[in-house]
Amino acid sequence: MTARPAAISRAIVLALETATPVVSLALRTADGVIHENMQPPGAQASEWLAPAAQLLLAGQGLKPRDLHALAVGAGPGAFTGLRVGYGFAKGLALGLEIPLIEIPSPLSIMTQAAEQGIPGVRLVALLDARRGEVYGQRYHREGARWFASGGPFAAKPDSLAEHLTSPADQWMAAGSGADVWSDVFRRLGLVLLPGVFPRARDLIAPALESLAAGAFRPVDQCEPVYLRSPVD
């Protein structure tokens, strides 16, 4: 179903990002304001998500039935986190009979980097994949807009340059993978933007675009992006 543009401007959307240990929820209310809630350190996403979502909604005088759509960070990322996030999102979307819109988790890293006005026209968003690897997604800028270049990939940090389309010193890197392996990436020549991680608030804008265009899958077909066997 494609929502009418008039309805999109007042759409109420709940977003969740669980691809990394930094789990978050964001609620976009009808007035366009985004409210965000971050999982406290030490909490388990499987226990935190449902009550936190209820509190976030109740804080704005809303109930789950008031939602027009859900958005979920699709990964790549930690298997357990993605499984928990998708389980919660799909169950809620099916119960409410509303769209579930999947947004690549690295897109949030790109969004935050763009908001900081980074120089250059090439960015690789990197997530720590553990087991000595990173998950990556390349982006390039055309004018004021950023676009994904190819699909996500998994790589050993010291072989990242093999996945880039130009010399490493022409790229900026951001995300937990860039932070964890900063020494390696600096030696390769990348410019690093530290302290950036996927956040639910950054899923709202692309989710509204997808909602307006009707660009989303049936809920029962929604699955996260796994780039390797399901072991964290």
Image (cartoon, rainbow, N blue to C red):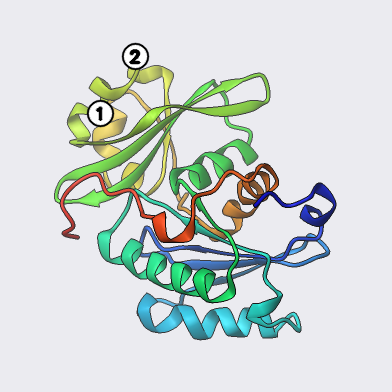
Q: From the top left corner, tell me how far across and down residue 96 is, in percent.
A: 58, 74
**Mark 2 crowdedness (10 Å alpha carbons): few <14, some 14-19, many ≥20:** few
SS at circle 2 = loop
For residue 167, which numbered disc appears in the image? 2
Q: Amino acid at mark 2?
A: Pro
Residue 16 lies, with reference to residue 203, above or below; the image says below
Q: Which comes before the other along the chain, label 2 or label 1?
A: 1
Res 12 → quadrant: bottom right
Q: Is residue 43 visible?
A: no
Q: Which residue occupies 53% across, 76% down?
A: 95
What residue is shown with label 1?
Answer: 160
Q: Is residue 60 left or right of residue 197?
A: right
**Where in the figure is residue 110, as x and y percent of width and height?**
52, 39
For residue 185, say whether it is visible.
Answer: yes
**Residue 161: image x %, image y %?**
26, 22
Q: Would you place residue 188 above or below residue 54 in this image?
A: above
Question: Which residue shows up at 71% across the image and 75% down it?
Answer: 66
Seen as rendered, the residue at the extreme front is 1
Q: x, y percentage for residue 232?
A: 19, 60
Which residue shows up at 40% across the image and 55% down it? 221
Task: Using residue 222 as the reference point, say whether residue 159 is left or right of it.
Answer: left
SS label for mark 1:
helix
For the residue pair 68 and 23, the one nearer the viewer reads as 68
